[in-house]
Image (cartoon, helix red, strand yellow):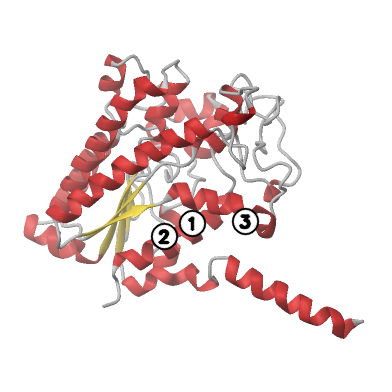
Amino acid sequence: MVSSKLPFALLLCSLFFFLLPHVSNAHLLKLCEFEAIYNLGDSISDTGNLIQEDLLLCLVDFHMVKTCIGMQRVDVQMASKSAGIPLLNAYLNANSTKTHGVNFAVAGSTALPVEFLAENGVIAPVTNSSLTIQLKWMGRHFNTTCHNSKDCIEKHRKSLFMVGEIGGNDYNYAFFQGKTIDELTNIVQNVVKTIKEVVMRVIGFGATRIVVPGNFPIGCMPIYLTGFHTNDSTAYDEFHCLKELNNFSMYHNLHLQQAIKELQEKYPHVTIVYGDYYNAFKWVLQKAAILGFDTQSLQKACCGSGGDYNFSLAKLCGTPNVPVCPKPLERMSWDGIHSTQKAYFFMAQWLIRDIFQKLRCIA
């Protein structure tokens, strides 16, 4: 009986090995010999800037607490670990060590200036620290660490720069303030243009390896599944994600990839890599059962209340009487907007492997 089960067990182990990101991904970026990482972005990678910027918001608006204290780690923190670099400290934390890079990301931030969004009828309610503001912070920091442009170029020869993920909040705010997909197509052009301009500025600081992440499949997230629910079954794909919203994410990502291609042609000495967050998320969704997620609750928020997706804008995670699920390790979505740490871990492993192949760290 034991011997008959052994080949099957070995087969399962083999499948598990090939389907999961390799364990060696944990330190894969060490081969690039990065000495520092510099990050621009939003709540996906904020490690404490928002709480420094607006402590009152974090204390009063309880659902923001998780991002305020820098719990999201899909990219920059996982990348730091993989590169063997100490976890990045927030730029606005004046007392923190910044010898191995700086994190300029702010939870709730937008790619476009909040003034531009307001002119187009979109209010950014969380922070004014858009991508261009973060870039100014970066410039100020390098003014204190570099003697001149040539010195900066030399110092950053072994640094990794991450421009994003950014732009997701521009769309989140717009969609939930009543804007349609058609109305948002012009905003996409401006979001991508802003990211492209910031990448050029980053290259001016001496960056030679840059990662520019795209957007997630927003049609798979509880906040959108709740807000744009429809009884039309043809609106959903095989994963019960809203196809039209995912197509919008792909529209942004395609334009971003085209911008990266143009930048690569303009700066052939710089390696600029697209961070494929869309397919990293979809990979985890596809392999959910193997990865240990509850396939019956993939699109239900762990921390939330109400409806088919355990999410309500009126009762966000962290507000009074909003429960947390008993087994968060079985959920992909934490609060209906952000993923759980386990989901981010597997996304990051997929991303690190994909990005490493394109960074050309080994001749």
* Residue 322, x across and y down, in percent: 69, 28
The residue that appears at 37% across and 22% down in the rendered structure is: 182
Q: Determine the image quadrant of residue 313.
A: top right
Q: Within 10 Å of the Cα at label 3, are there few (<14), some (14-19), or many (20+) other Cα atoms?
A: some
Q: Disc 2, disc 3: CB below 8 Å?
A: no
Q: Nearer the viewer, residue 142 or 229?
A: 229
Q: Disc 1, disc 2: CB below 8 Å?
A: yes
* Residue carrying label 3: 287
**Residue type at mark 2?**
Ala
The quarter of the picture where the N terminus appears is bottom right
Residue 213 visible in rendering:
yes
For residue 240, above or below residue 282: above
The residue that appears at 31% across and 34% down in the rendered structure is: 111
The quarter of the picture where the C terminus appears is bottom left
The residue that appears at 44% across and 36% down in the rendered structure is: 247
**Residue type at mark 3?**
Lys
Q: Nearer the viewer, residue 47 or 274?
A: 274
* Residue carrying label 1: 348
Mark 1 / mark 2, whichever is N-terminal: 2
Q: For the residues marked 3 and 1, what is the alpha-carbon distance in whole angstroms?
A: 14 Å
Q: What SS does tag 3 mark?
A: loop
* Residue 118, x across and y down, in percent: 31, 16
* Residue carrying label 2: 79
